[in-house]
């Protein structure tokens, strides 16, 4: 199943059990982001160990408002015994997670260390 939701600044699409986010995630896209995350949690939150994977490798910029939406979805998943895991966070996104202290609420997928 593949659905694409697009606006001028954000590209959200679902690939299997992975929600792929792309473009600019900011205050203008928070409603769309929230809806996509919560729907993805509803549909895929009960798979295997309850982990829901969100690929952000195509995100070009992110602000604190969008990260708060991701953190709220993560809290919601935890209350139900699951988790939201971000894949492909670029250094700028990681830095923003640390600056906002939201790194405490959001799990990042571990990446293998190149040989």
Image (spheres, rainbow, N blue to C red):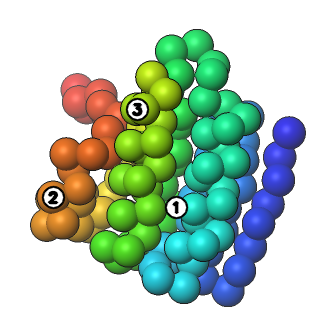
**Marks 2 and 1, Cα distance to the nearest angstrom?**
22 Å
Residue 50 position, x and y percent, is 53, 22
Query: For mark 1, what is the residue?
Result: 58
Left or right side of 61 for 104? left
Exactly how many numbered labels are in the figure? 3
Q: Nearer the viewer, mark 2 or mark 1?
A: 2
Q: Is residue 23 visible?
A: no
Query: For mark 2, what is the residue?
Result: 101
Q: Residue at x 86, y 39 (%)?
A: 1
Query: For mark 3, what is the residue?
Result: 78
**Marks 1 and 3, Cα distance to the nearest angstrom?**
25 Å
- Quarter of the picture containing the C terminus is top left
Left or right side of 15 for 65? left
Q: Residue at x 82, y 53 (%)?
A: 3
**Marks 2 and 3, Cα distance to the nearest angstrom?**
18 Å
Secondary structure of residue under mark 3: helix
Q: Depth check: give the residue in front, 98 or 115.
A: 98
**Could you tell which of marks 2 and 3 lies nearer the N-terminus?**
3
Q: Is residue 105 visible?
A: yes
């Amino acid at each position: 199943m593949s659905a694409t939701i697009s606006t001028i600044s954000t590209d959200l699409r679902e690939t299997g059990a992975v929600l792929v986010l792309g473009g600019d995630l900011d205050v203008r896209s928070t409603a769309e982001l929230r809806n996509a995350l919560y729907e993805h949690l509803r549909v895929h939150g009960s798979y295997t160990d309850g982990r829901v994977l969100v690929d952000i490798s195509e995100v070009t910029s992110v602000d604190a408002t969008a990260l708060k939406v991701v953190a709220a979805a993560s809290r919601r998943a935890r209350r139900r015994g699951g988790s939201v895991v971000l894949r492909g966070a670029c250094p700028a996104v990681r830095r923003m997670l640390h600056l906002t202290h939201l790194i405490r609420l959001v799990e990042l997928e571990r990446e293998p260390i190149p040989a």
